[in-house]
């Protein structure tokens, strides 16, 4: 049996990807989850993992080649698969790519939910399995999970949520308090008829899902916290204030560098997308209001640790060791070469932390 490796669809806007490196060569044995190739999207580089076990028998698309989403870029097969069968599969794959006849996989299904007088936007992937809800951080949105949501959806129903004031949700955060944001997440679960969910939160989102679990533990099956806010007092207040105040690409880009261990990941497209968000009506007030929730002077204003200590929900925390926004605190998993956006720089590690069942509690 031949298993095609296809160009993934990482996020709502991705239509093509360019292969920048292959980590394996023809003839190498691979297992599901092994790194196969680096791919440059319209937002950021990502690493494609193997969809299964086998031998990489053919590389269909070379380094430097752009391939539409869904196009076959390599073939996995058993070692005894006939060469003629593989060559025919390569011929068909090349023909589809060059003719533009690639059938793209279905991307996330977007929707909205009315919660507390606000419209919350979300994107869903997956049709079977336990429910996972992904909650982004300050200034982020549902697309920040682009490298995690797709592989996670192979075995889960995965909703990526825009918190109030972010993404395509209503640009109103009320008092901007942790309680208000946690109520939004719980209201989202109620609106979609979700009885229990595994909540995954990054940065501010980590504090939000912790508060949600503290208020309604019966609604939460597990917590995975990714570089969460509210666990310690140290914070890069200059980054938060600079992000909120920046109005041009030149002003914004230095602050974005604090998000990654590798500043090369800060692309012009990423900066432009964030500026487009920041220029929408109401966003300036949203970000300013949330600064009061996040900061007490130059220290963190949120203290989520007492909330977590009172929650009897299995929990797992992952942190990038080179986080320049929230210095790494106590965690179950540390990722050496990742910064604050560990789910963008090391999505495989975050995916493993969500799935591996090693949650404490």
Image: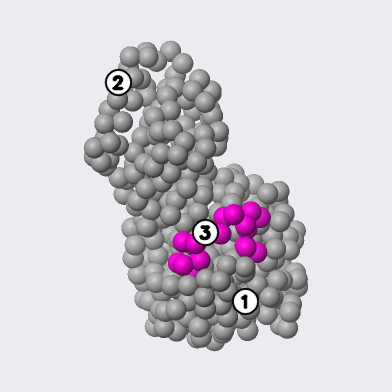
Q: What is the spatial separation of the Cα atoms under label 3 and label 1, in whole angstroms?
A: 18 Å
The answer to which of 231 and 47 lies nearer the viewer is: 47
Residue highlighted by disc 3: 267
Coloring scheme of the render?
Answer: one colour
Image quadrant containing the C terminus: bottom right
- The verdict on residue 267 being magenta is yes
Residue highlighted by disc 1: 242
Asked if one can make out residue 217 in the rendered structure from this viewpoint, the answer is: no
Q: Is residue 10 above or below residue 292?
A: above
Type of secondary structure dominating the magenta stretch: helix
Q: Position of residue 178 (x, y in %)?
A: 59, 77
Q: Position of residue 258 (x, y in %)?
A: 65, 64
At mark 1, the secondary structure is: helix
Residue highlighted by disc 2: 88
Which residue is painted at 72% across and 54% down in the image?
321
Q: Is residue 110 above or below residue 99?
A: below
Q: Exactly how many numbered labels are in the figure?
A: 3
Q: Position of residue 229 (x, y in %)?
A: 66, 68
Which residue is painted at 41% across and 83% down in the image?
281
The answer to which of 226 and 102 lies nearer the viewer is: 102
At mark 2, the secondary structure is: helix
CB under 8 Å between discs 3 and 1: no
| Residue numbers of the magenta segment | 257-274
- The verdict on residue 338 being magenta is no
Q: What is the spatial separation of the Cα atoms under label 3 and label 2, in whole angstroms?
A: 38 Å
Determine crowd level at label 3: few under 14, some 14-19, many 20+ residues with C-alpha closer than 10 A.
some
């Amino acid at each position: 049996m031949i298993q095609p490796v296809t160009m993934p669809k990482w996020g709502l806007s991705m239509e093509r990807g360019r292969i920048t490196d292959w980590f394996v060569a023809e003839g190498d044995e691979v297992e599901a989850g092994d790194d196969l190739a680096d791919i440059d999207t319209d937002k950021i580089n990502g690493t494609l993992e193997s969809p299964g076990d086998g031998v990489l028998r053919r590389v269909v698309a070379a380094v430097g080649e752009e391939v539409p989403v869904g196009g076959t870029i390599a073939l996995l097969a058993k070692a005894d698969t006939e060469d003629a069968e593989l060559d025919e599969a390569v011929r068909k794959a090349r023909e589809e790519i060059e003719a533009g006849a690639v059938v793209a996989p279905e991307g996330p299904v977007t929707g909205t939910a009315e919660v507390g007088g606000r419209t919350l936007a979300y994107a869903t992937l997956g049709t079977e399995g336990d429910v996972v809800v992904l909650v982004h951080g300050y200034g982020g949105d549902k697309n920040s999970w682009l490298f995690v949501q797709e592989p996670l959806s192979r075995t889960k129903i995965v909703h990526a949520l825009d918190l109030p004031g972010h993404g395509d949700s209503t640009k109103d955060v009320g008092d901007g308090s942790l309680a208000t944001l946690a109520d939004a997440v719980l209201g989202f679960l109620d609106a979609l008829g979700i009885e229990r969910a595994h909540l995954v939160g990054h940065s501010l989102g980590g504090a939000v899902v912790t508060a949600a679990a503290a208020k309604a533990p019966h609604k939460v099956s597990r917590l995975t916290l990714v570089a969460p806010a509210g666990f310690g007092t140290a914070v890069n207040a200059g980054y938060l204030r600079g992000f909120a105040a920046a109005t041009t690409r030149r002003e914004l880009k230095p602050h974005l560098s604090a998000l990654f261990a590798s500043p090369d990941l800060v692309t012009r497209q990423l900066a432009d997308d964030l500026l487009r968000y920041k220029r929408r009506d109401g966003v300036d007030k949203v970000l300013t209001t949330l600064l009061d929730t996040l900061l007490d002077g130059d220290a963190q204003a949120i203290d989520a640790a007492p909330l977590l200590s009172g929650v009897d929900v299995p929990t797992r925390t992952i942190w990038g060791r080179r986080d320049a926004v929230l210095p790494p605190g106590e965690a179950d998993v540390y990722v050496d070469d990742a910064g604050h956006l560990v789910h963008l720089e090391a999505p495989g590690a975050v995916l493993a932390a969500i799935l591996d069942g090693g949650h404490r509690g």
